[in-house]
């Protein structure tokens, strides 16, 4: 960092928001994305809803198998 930066008037935590959520992107392979997009279109729902439903179902199966 350069010495000429002046932080003397800076305010610590000015942009901190404890309720902020970080949503990381998930990158799918093109063939998987095409398949999911097709299924979501047929069902009339968005891709996020479809993927979340599938993952929740998988989580339920994993929990019952323990």
Image (cartoon, rainbow, N blue to C red):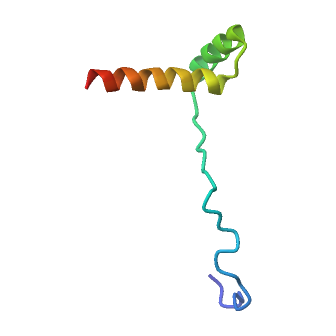
Residue 19 in percent (x, y) is at: 62, 57
Q: How many marks?
A: 0
Q: Where residue 17 appears, x then y in whole percent? A: 65, 63
Q: For the point 70% across and 82% down, which residue is it?
A: 11
In the drawing, does residue 9 fall left or right of residue 3? right
Q: Residue at horizontal 65%, vertical 90%?
A: 3
Judging depth in this view, the residue of 66 and 51 nearest the camera is 66
Question: In the depicted view, which residue is nearer to us: 25 or 43?
Answer: 43
Say which residue appears at 59% left-offset and 17% top-offset: 31
Does 29 sit above or below residue 4?
above
In the image, 3 versus 42, the foreground residue is 42
Quadrant of the image containing the N terminus: bottom right
> Where is 42 relative to 62, above or below?
above
Quarter of the picture holding the C terminus: top left
Toward the top, the furthest residue is 42
Expressed as whole percent of the image width and height from the top left, the position of residue 18 reads: 60, 62
Tell me: residue 6, above or below residue 41.
below
User: Splitting the image into 4 quarters, where does residue 33 fall?
Assistant: top right
| Image x and y of residue 41, in percent | 71, 12
Query: Quadrant of residue 58 in the image?
Result: top left
**What residue is rendered at 61% in x and 17% in y?**
36
């Amino acid at each position: 960092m350069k010495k000429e930066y002046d932080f003397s008037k800076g305010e610590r935590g000015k942009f901190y928001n404890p309720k902020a959520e970080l949503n990381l992107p998930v990158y799918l392979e093109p063939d998987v994305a095409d398949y999911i997009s097709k299924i979501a279109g047929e069902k009339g729902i968005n891709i996020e809803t479809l993927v979340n439903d599938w993952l929740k179902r998988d989580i339920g199966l994993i929990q019952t198998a323990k």
